[in-house]
Amino acid sequence: MKKLASVILAAILALSLLPALAEQADFLGVWYLQSYSINGQHMEAADLGMSMVLELAADGAGAARPLNGPDESLEMNWREENGQVLVNQQGVDMVLTVEGEELRLEAEQEGAVMILIFTRTAPELLTAPEGEEVAIESVEQLNGTWTLLGLQSGGTYVYGEALEQMGLTYGLVFADGSCTVYVMDQEVSTLPVELRDGKAVTETMTLTMIEGEILVQTDEYESVIYYTRVRPE
């Protein structure tokens, strides 16, 4: 009789765990960052040229790593508390919810609200412009204003409009044989330009042209910046 009661009790407990197991199945496994927002400022992972892979295991362990960056991962863990699923990373709790095909992590720290949106599908990330290099024939050929198209750094290409949304703007203005560099709408330097082997060269940077429309800047910082000409309206 006691054995029968034990079997019945075990069955009841197993049934009571089914909803919880079903809920866990909704969020366990591999997820890919699609977008994030901080205090309402929304950014798409594709525009940033980077994404995150989030892995959540049934034992409460978790990890996050770049999709296309260095092979490094951040350890984390998840737990159920007061009817919520919380993901903790470096002491910060993020509330996890699943809505349809999206997993959402939300956290508030020092007054800032951050929301991360994941799906099961990896985003298609932008890549740096490619094309045949075209010789620059004269410094005057560059005259006018050039605005940021994108930035390549550490294997990641970030779209210019995404940087502008974060308040990071870059620009070049060519006139009278010189190039003026603007960062965040502030003039940084004005330097003379000379031609060397079809490239425009200043004291701090080298500029090449591809497809006759895009300037490619390289410098001592090993980053590559792409500019496109601002056409008069």
Image (cartoon, grey):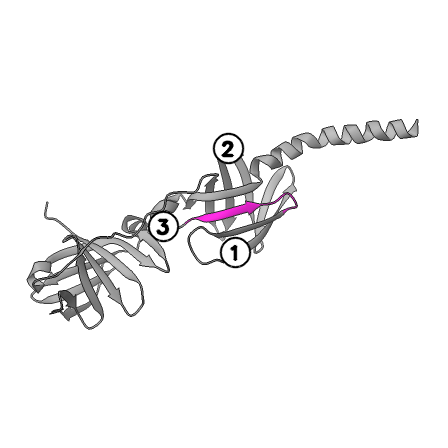
Question: Magenta segment, which residues?
Answer: 51-60
How far apart, in angstroms, are the residues tagged by discs 3 and 2?
A: 25 Å
Residue 140 image label: none
Looking at the image, is 7 positioned above or below residue 133? above
**In contact (CB < 8 Å): disc 3 and disc 2:** no
Residue 221: x and y in percent read: 31, 68
Q: Nearer the viewer, mark 3 or mark 2?
A: 3
Residue that mark 3 sits on? 49
Residue 99 image label: 2
What element does badge 3 sit on? Answer: loop
Residue 73 image label: 1
Name the residue type under label 3.
Gly
Q: Nearer the viewer, mark 2 or mark 1?
A: 1
Name the residue type under label 2.
Glu
What element does badge 2 sit on? Answer: strand
Mark 2, residues whose alpha carbon is within 10 Å: few (<14), some, or many (≥20)? few
Which is more N-terminal, label 3 or label 1?
Answer: 3
Report if residue 92 is visible in the image.
no
Where the C terminus falls, by quadrant? top left
Q: Nearer the viewer, residue 179 or 37?
A: 179
The residue under the point 58% across, 40% down is 28
